[in-house]
Image (tube, helix red, strand yellow):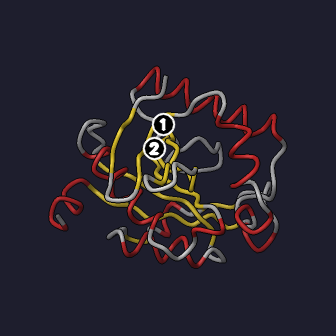
Amino acid sequence: MADIIAETERLVLRTIEESDAAEQMRVLNTPAVMARLGGVKELHEIEAKHAKAQALYSRHGFGFLMMIEKETGDLVGHCGIKQVDSPLAPNRGDFEVGWLVREDRWRRGYAREGMEAVLQWAFGRVDAPHVVALTSEANVGSWKLMEKLGMTRRSDLDFDDPDYPPEDRRVIQYSLTREEWEKKQ
C-alpha cells in the first residue's frame, strides 16, 4: 500500500505502487512529455525506474512520488527526490529533485505545487542540506520553474551526457540550500 507523503491544495503525493507503471506509460510517456528527457521509454524501462525509486524509498526514506489530482483521482505526474546518479555529474550523490507532468495538465501550476511540497519534504523530514535539479538549456520551462522555486544556476556543475540528443546533451544544474528555502517561506 502506498504511503502518502504530502498533500497540497490540489494534489496527493504518494509513493509508487507496482500498478503505476502501466498508467505512467499511458499518460506520461508521450512524445511531448518525454521530448527533453531522452524520448519515449519502453514499459520495462519505466518498471525499472519505479523499482529503483521504491528501493531508494525503502532504504533512505525518499524517492519519486506519484502526483494524484484530488478532484479526479487521476495521475497528473510524478515528482520527488533521488540522488544524482549520472557517472558524468561532478556532484554525484547530491539530493536531486525533479518532476514530470502530463501534457493535458501543463500550465496549471501542478509542477510548482508538487515541487514546493517536495522541497518542504527534502528540507524537513529528509534533512537535505541542499538540493539540485538537472535539465538541459533547451528545456526552458524546466529551468524557469527552477528559478521560480528560488533555485540558483550552478554552471560549475554542468556536464555533457552523450545519451541525449545534441540539443539536450549539455546538462545544466540549479541548486537551493535549506537556508535559502527557509528565507523564502
Given residues 40 and 76, the one toward you in this image is 76
Q: Is residue 160 left or right of residue 31?
A: left
- Quadrant containing the C terminus in the rendered view: bottom left
Q: Quadrant of residue 124?
A: top left
Amino acid type at image mark 1: Gly
Task: Give the residue pinned by disc 1.
Answer: 63
- Is 105 drawn above or below residue 144 in the view shown? above
Q: Quadrant of residue 54?
A: top right
Q: Is residue 39 left or right of residue 136?
A: right
Residue at position x 47%, y 46% in the image: 80
Residue at position x 41%, y 66% in the image: 112
Task: Give the residue pinned by disc 2.
Answer: 81
Nearer the N terminus, badge 2 or badge 1? 1
Residue at position x 59%, y 64% in the image: 135
Q: Quadrant of residue 164?
A: bottom right
Given residues 44 and 4, the one toward you in this image is 4
- Is 155 drawn above or below residue 115 in the view shown? below
Amino acid type at image mark 2: Ile
Residue at position x 67%, y 67% in the image: 170
